[in-house]
Amino acid sequence: MGKTKIEWTDRVWNVMTGCLGPRNDGVLCPYCYGKGLAVRFNNGDFDPAWHPERLDEPLRVKKPSRFFTGSVTDYFGNWVDQYHFNEILRVTARCPQHTFYMLTKQADHIACKAGNHARLYREYGWYNNVWLGVSVTCTADLGRIERLRDAWPGHKFVSFEPLIAINRAPDLQGIEWCIIGAMTGCGAKKHQPAYGDALSIMNAADKLGIPVFLKENLALPSSAERRQEFPK
């Protein structure tokens, strides 16, 4: 666990690292943040690994903090068994002073994991400190928002990062926060999204009173405000 340069969170908490998907033509997402870290610090090994020694890290942080939970994995991937997923949630239940954000591309798996999530709510009696978001990078990903809305009983957000191209306004009913960012790392300057795409998302959010966080890497016109709003 450690503090992070990710603007919308205070700390990252990675009890699991690594990923097996989604894959295109047998390779991981070309913009993968976690894979880049694995190349730098783990000889490129990005196979899933469980780190039990990190499990109780949030318990040692007394100051209320925002935790990006699984910043270099996807806890809704089919390589994450229910036991390990539940172990993560049990820790969040013991830390009501913190807010935990999970992010997934595996929206089809939300319903299965959410059933156990609801059971653990009843077991531990907590609800409001776990947020689940879906990553949406292009028009083809917009269906993830619907699956999130239908399957997750708690707080919901959408991370439009890296925003590549979205040709229609998203349906954000039931969503409580939107994050918008550009690609980072190698080749990022060649993939700066059109501001019109970001504006379309912001307009859809504003109609519903949803806060918007624009990351620093998103290029804006000189007249545009860099909104960095958080949910209440």
Image: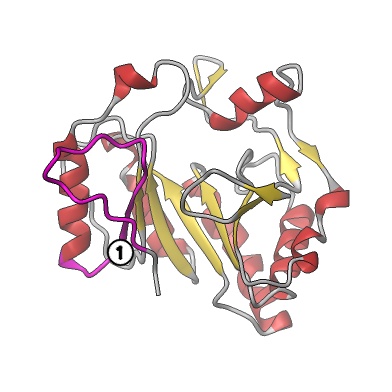
Residue at the image position 60 percent from the left and 46 percent from the top: 4
Residue 217 drawn at (x, y percent): 36, 35
Query: Looking at numbered disc 1 in the image, what kind of residue is underneath it?
Result: Pro
Residue 38 appears anywhere in the view? yes
Range shown magenta? 207-229
Is 60 magenta? The answer is no
Residue 76 drawn at (x, y percent): 60, 48
Apparent side of residue 125 relative to residue 148 in the rendered image (left or right): right
Q: Is the residue 11 above or below the residue 20 in the image?
A: below
Residue 169 appears anywhere in the view? no
Q: Nearer the viewer, residue 14 or 83?
A: 14
Residue 79 drawn at (x, y percent): 70, 39
Q: Is the residue 131 above or below the residue 22 in the image?
A: below
Occupied quadrant, residue 171 = bottom left
Residue 90 drawn at (x, y percent): 75, 68
Is 223 magenta? The answer is yes
Q: Residue furthest front?
A: 222
Occupied quadrant, residue 27 = top right
Residue at the image position 21 percent from the left and 68 percent from the top: 208
Residue at the image position 74 percent from the left and 49 percent from the top: 81
- The residue where tag 1 is placed is 211
Q: Residues within 10 Å of mark 1 (few under 14, many from 20)?
A: many
Q: Is the residue 45 above or below the residue 145 in the image?
A: above
Dot 1 falls on a residue whose secondary structure is loop
| Circle count | 1
Apparent side of residue 121 relative to residue 27 in the rendered image (left or right): right
Q: Quadrant location of the C terminus?
A: bottom left
Apparent side of residue 76 relative to residue 16 in the rendered image (left or right): left
Q: Nearer the viewer, residue 121 or 222?
A: 222
Apparent side of residue 113 relative to residue 84 in the rendered image (left or right): left
Q: Nearer the viewer, residue 168 or 94?
A: 94
